[in-house]
Amino acid sequence: MATTNDLKNGMVLNLEGQLWQVQEFLHVKPGKGPAFVRSKLKNVLSGKIIDKTFNAGTKVETANVDRREMQYLYHDGEDFVFMDSTDYEQVALSAALVGDASDYLLENQQAQVAFHEGTPLYVEMPPAVELTITHTDPGLQGDRSSGGTKPATVETGLEIQVPLFLDEGVKVRVDTRTGDYLGRVKE
């Protein structure tokens, strides 16, 4: 048990028998009336996002979530196969469970898989990954580092916007939370 004053981003709560992950929270002290906590919660299983307001200091039940460092091995039909880095146990996760993380997964890449009572909940990617551009249209004469962007497809099949001067075969950093281009990787 914890109180709403202890909320942190990423914390998983057990509300009415369902698991909800805290996406955002804000402690509000209005000039008149009691303080409260405004939060944005994401259902761990369905992905549904809701806004919920708690009175300050209200007790909430936290869920015991075990995050394990796992290595992505391969894609098998509808499943993604991961291996626990400590005991080499393999786990097959459904495409629905992996979700948007599949856009950034390369073989042998590390990711965190969250478990609750032995059941996998979701896959958490590092904040940024390095991917190679496999297809993009060539830039036009006069295109330089400042200016517009163009679509580019990376090795996982994800399409991102990159600066006009980048070509195929260039390795770039991509933000896994937003899908934005962060910069070119120096080799």
Image (cartoon, rainbow, N blue to C red):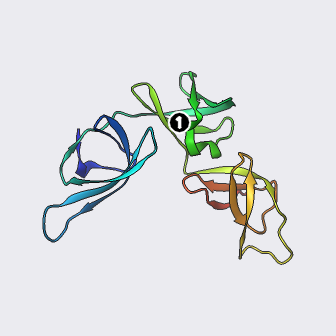
- In this view, 185 is above or below 102: below
Check the picture and name the quadrant holding the N terminus.
top left
Q: Give the percent coordinates (x, y) of residue 105.
A: 64, 41
Residue 154 seen in this snapshot: yes
Give left or right: position of 61 versus 119: left
Left or right: where 30 falls relative to 38? left
Instruction: Please report the residue visible at 68 percent of the width from the left and 29 percent of the height from the top.
Output: 77
Residue found 43% across the figure and 24% down from its top = 118
Disc 1 crowd rating (10 Å Cα; few below 14, some 14-19, many 20+) is some
Quarter occupied by residue 18? top left
Q: Within the image, what quadrant is residue 17 found in?
A: top left
Q: Residue furthest right?
A: 141
**Residue identified by numbered label 1:** 97
Q: Give SS at disc 1.
A: helix
Q: Residue at x 28, y 37 (%)?
A: 16
Q: Amino acid at mark 1?
A: Leu
* Relative side of 51 to 155, left or right: left
Q: Position of residue 54 (x, y in %)?
A: 23, 52
Q: How many marks?
A: 1
Q: Is residue 175 above or below residue 117?
A: below
Left or right: 8, with 123 as reference point:
left
Residue 156 versus residue 119 in the image, above or below: below
